[in-house]
């Protein structure tokens, strides 16, 4: 368990502040809500919201579709924390800083991390709105949030042979079948951004074994695994990668697709939380 007790430590300061604002007891999970997928926050009962700008060590997201709030409440009858939005490395944040909220929810008691993101489709059979369970990832951001002094409670060399928990993945697929939601497994390529990939880069990613590409999630999972958290992640495929469609890619279209797919995503994640 990460040590959040040292005086004047940024993690200790953030956790202590949030405990004064939130009645945290034993959250079964923390949920990270990616671009356009923040609607799940409306399903959290008795939600108490704290703006990122008020939390020590946090930054305000500057991207549409990221509310910038930490929530506490119940989902599926279980106590949860939710991070509504991210601050990304492409906004100028270091990898360790972009993953800092994961350390904070861990310090508040969460031991399971459920992540979501919007992603471009590399697999040619993916259509906009497809939900994909991340089975593995490629860290093509070429940044590692664990570089530097080992944080208390971290493993120096965390095992990444199964970064996304097999049991949680199986649960997601079983839940999806029961709800009639089409769900695919795939490999997520994390890139730094903020520019979208070129057609040549998409062809490269396809050859490397990627099924989808995005600009988040990987640093958070690396930090979570170093602390021993279980991880599950779902991507909403918003568009074909460059060169796979004649249409240009716009962030507004990404947000619109995630909003259309949000109902299935919300039902899926709520049922997963209820099963924990």
Image: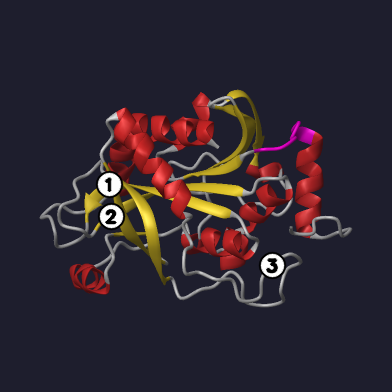
Q: Looking at the image, is mark 3 or mark 2 nearer the viewer?
A: 3
Which residues lie in the magenta part? 21-27
Q: Position of residue 264 (x, y in %)?
A: 34, 32
**Picture disc at residue 120:** 2
Residue 213, quarter of picture: bottom left
Please identify, in this view, whether the residue under mark 1 or under mark 3 is nearer the observer: 3
Distance from the alpha carbon under mark 1 to that under mark 3 = 34 Å
- The residues tagged by marks 3 and 2 sit, at their Cα atoms, a distance apart of 32 Å
- Name the residue at the right extreme: 7
The extreme left residue here reads 246
- The residue tagged 1 is 238
Mark 1 or 3, nearer chain start:
3
CA distance separating discs 2 and 1: 6 Å
**Of pointers 2 and 1, the one earlier in the residue sequence:** 2
Cβ–Cβ below 8 Å for labels 2 and 1?
yes
Magenta span includes 78: no
Q: The C terminus lies in which quarter of the figure?
A: top right
Residue 70, percent across and down? 62, 39
Tell me which label, 3 or 2, sits earlier in the chain: 2
Q: Which mark is residue 275?
A: none
Mark 2 neighbour class, 10 Å CA radius: few under 14, some 14 to 19, many 20 or more:
many
Is residue 49 visible from the viewing direction of this image? yes
Which residue shows up at 81% across the image and 36% down it?
Answer: 20
* 22 within the magenta span: yes
At numbered mark 2, what does the secondary structure look like: helix, strand or loop?
strand
């Amino acid at each position: 368990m990460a040590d959040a007790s040292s005086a004047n430590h940024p993690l200790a300061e953030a956790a202590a502040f949030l405990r004064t604002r939130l009645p945290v007891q034993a959250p079964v999970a923390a949920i990270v809500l990616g671009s356009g997928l923040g609607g799940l926050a409306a399903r959290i009962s008795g939600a108490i919201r704290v703006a990122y700008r008020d939390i020590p060590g946090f930054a305000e997201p500057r991207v549409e579709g990221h509310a910038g709030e930490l929530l506490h409440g119940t989902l599926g009858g279980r106590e949860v924390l939710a991070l509504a939005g991210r601050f990304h490395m492409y906004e100028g944040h270091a990898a360790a800083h972009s993953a800092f909220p994961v350390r904070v929810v861990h310090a508040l008691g969460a031991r399971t991390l459920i992540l979501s993101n919007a992603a471009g489709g590399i697999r040619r059979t993916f259509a906009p709105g497809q939900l994909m369970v991340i089975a593995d990832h490629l860290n093509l951001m070429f940044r590692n949030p664990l570089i530097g002094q080992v944080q208390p409670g971290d493993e120096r060399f965390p095992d990444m042979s199964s970064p996304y928990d097999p049991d949680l993945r199986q649960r997601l697929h079983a839940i999806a079948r029961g709800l009639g939601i089409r769900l695919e497994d795939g490999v997520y390529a994390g890139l730094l951004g903020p520019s979208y990939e070129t057609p040549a880069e998409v062809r490269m990613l396809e050859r490397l074994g990627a099924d989808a590409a995005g600009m988040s999630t990987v640093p958070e999972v690396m930090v979570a695994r170093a602390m021993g958290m279980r991880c599950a992640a779902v991507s909403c495929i918003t568009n074909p990668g460059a060169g796979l469609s004649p249409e240009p890619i716009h962030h507004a279209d990404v947000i619109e697709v995630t909003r259309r797919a949000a109902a299935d995503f919300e039902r899926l994640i709520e049922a997963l939380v209820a099963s924990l």
